[in-house]
């Protein structure tokens, strides 16, 4: 069992502690942020990141950076680099309720929630987050610091470029390449490769003019 520090006090930080303590060999012993407004969070010490090495030495503690997809995942990437520079090992979490064959190549600081399906020959870079219920097809590659929300389908032989965000129910056909720092909105259907920094948002469902009691449903 390793003693683990969680960087982040938002919802992701709370969830990280929950999953690590119930479904991993790691014990969360503290939280950290850059500018804490109190001295504890969730009943554990909350320490300013600059003071962390003095109180929780890198050689004796590991870290997980629980920062979401803001600024197209760049905040999470930058925090990971800062933690590495201080000498902290960044650990990954793979839910015992996720499906995989044990051959998945996974970088550091990844978080794989329950009900994900990872087929054979999948590669995940550093800092990848797979929220619940995604399908990652065979021979697919998800590059560094991508964030896939839920019920995303990444078909076989597809590559998702670093720092990209994929919204709920997005679907990627097989054999395409998504550029770096793409934002693929909820419900998008991607049938071709994209360039870097592109945004795809499908048309939203619009309300009909009738009231529900007027359509005979």
Image (tube, grey):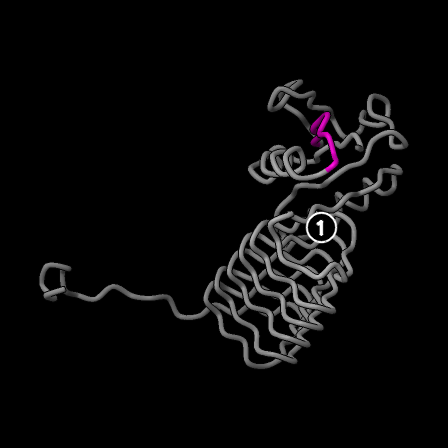
Q: Position of residue 53 (x, y in %)?
A: 85, 27
* For residue 52, above or below residue 159: above
In the image, the segment drawn in magenta is 25-33
Q: Position of residue 191 (x, y in %)?
A: 55, 80
In this view of the protein, which residue sits in the foreground, 81 or 132? 132
In this view of the protein, which residue sits in the foreground, 192 or 14? 14
Query: In the figure, residue 181 lies in which quadrant?
Result: bottom right
Instruction: Identify the residue at image location x=39%, y=70%.
Output: 203
Residue placed under numbered mark 1 in the picture: 110
**Residue 29 covered by magenta stretch:** yes
Q: Position of residue 112 (x, y in %)?
A: 64, 51
Instruction: Identify the residue at image location x=62%, y=36%.
Output: 13
Q: Position of residue 207 (x, y in %)?
A: 25, 63
- Which quarter of the figure is the C terminus placed in? bottom left
- Which quarter of the figure is the N terminus placed in? top right
Answer with left or right where residue 9 lies relative to residue 90.
left
**Residue 145 covered by magenta stretch:** no
- Evaluate whether residue 70 shows in this view: no
- Evaluate whether residue 96 shows in this view: yes
Q: Secondary structure at mark 1?
A: loop
Query: In the figure, residue 178 lies in which quadrant?
Result: bottom right
User: In this view, which residue lies farthest toward the front?
Assistant: 101
């Amino acid at each position: 069992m390793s003693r683990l520090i969680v960087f982040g006090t938002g919802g992701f930080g709370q969830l990280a502690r929950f999953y690590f303590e119930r479904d991993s060999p790691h014990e969360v012993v503290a939280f950290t942020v850059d500018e804490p407004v109190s001295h504890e969070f969730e009943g554990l010490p909350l320490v300013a990141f600059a003071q962390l090495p003095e109180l929780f030495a890198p050689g004796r503690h590991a870290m997980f950076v629980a920062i979401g997809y803001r600024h197209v995942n760049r905040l999470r990437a930058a925090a990971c680099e800062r933690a590495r520079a201080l000498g902290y090992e960044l650990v990954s979490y793979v839910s015992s309720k996720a499906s995989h064959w044990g051959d998945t190549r996974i970088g550091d600081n990844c978080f794989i929630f329950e009900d994900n399906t990872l087929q054979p020959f999948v590669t995940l870079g550093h800092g990848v987050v797979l929220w619940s219920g995604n399908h990652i097809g065979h021979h697919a590659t998800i590059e560094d610091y991508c964030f896939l929300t839920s019920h995303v389908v990444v078909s076989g032989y597809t590559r998702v470029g670093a720092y990209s965000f994929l919204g709920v129910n997005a679907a990627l056909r097989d054999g395409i390449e998504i550029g770096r720092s793409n934002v693929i909105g909820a419900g998008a259907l991607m049938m071709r490769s994209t360039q870097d920094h592109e945004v795809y948002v499908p048309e939203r469902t619009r309300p009909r003019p009738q009231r529900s009691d007027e359509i005979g449903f």
